[in-house]
Image (cartoon, rainbow, N blue to C red):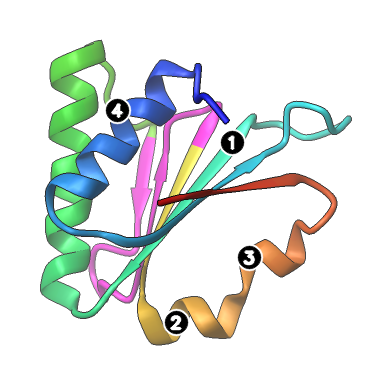
Amino acid sequence: MQIKNKTVKNIIKGIENVKGENINIIDFTKLENVDFKYFVICDCQSNIQVNAISNSVKKTVSKELKEKPFNIEGLENKNWVLMDYIDVIVHIFKKDFREIYELEELWADAEIINIQ
């Protein structure tokens, strides 16, 4: 599937720049009563990499689109960072935390796109 949303494209680019793994997009555009359009989810091996990915996403989106996240949560613990770009929510997990929360299972009624 071709990704058309510019924010999503640049988020993925930021994740890939620092070797984020297992990137999935959850597409909510066909669902009703959802306040956002996409989740972008990835995981990595360490707290340091969680931090590096969030910084890379922020820099990439800011440079390409002149947008900053509305909110960022989780930078204190760096196990799961959430970046809110209003229509697009980014979830950056340490691998073991992603397995606990299973967001893709929670939103199984939405389309899930795996980025290779």
Label 2 vs label 3: CA separation? 11 Å
Label 3 vs label 1: CA separation? 12 Å
Q: Which residue range is magenta in the image?
A: 71-88
* Badge 4 amino acid: Asn
> Which mark is first along the chain, 1 or 4?
4
Q: Nearer the viewer, residue 32 or 84?
A: 32
Query: What SS does tag 1 mark?
Result: strand
Query: What SS does tag 3 mark?
Result: helix
Dot 3 corresponds to which residue? 103
* Badge 1 amino acid: Tyr
Dot 1 corresponds to which residue? 38
- Label 3–label 1 contact, CB within 8 A: no
Res 51 quadrant in image? bottom left
Dot 2 corresponds to which residue? 97
> Which mark is first along the chain, 1 or 3?
1
* Badge 3 amino acid: Leu
Mark on residue 10? 4
Q: Residues within 10 Å of mark 1 (few under 14, many from 20)?
A: many
> Which mark is first along the chain, 2 or 4?
4
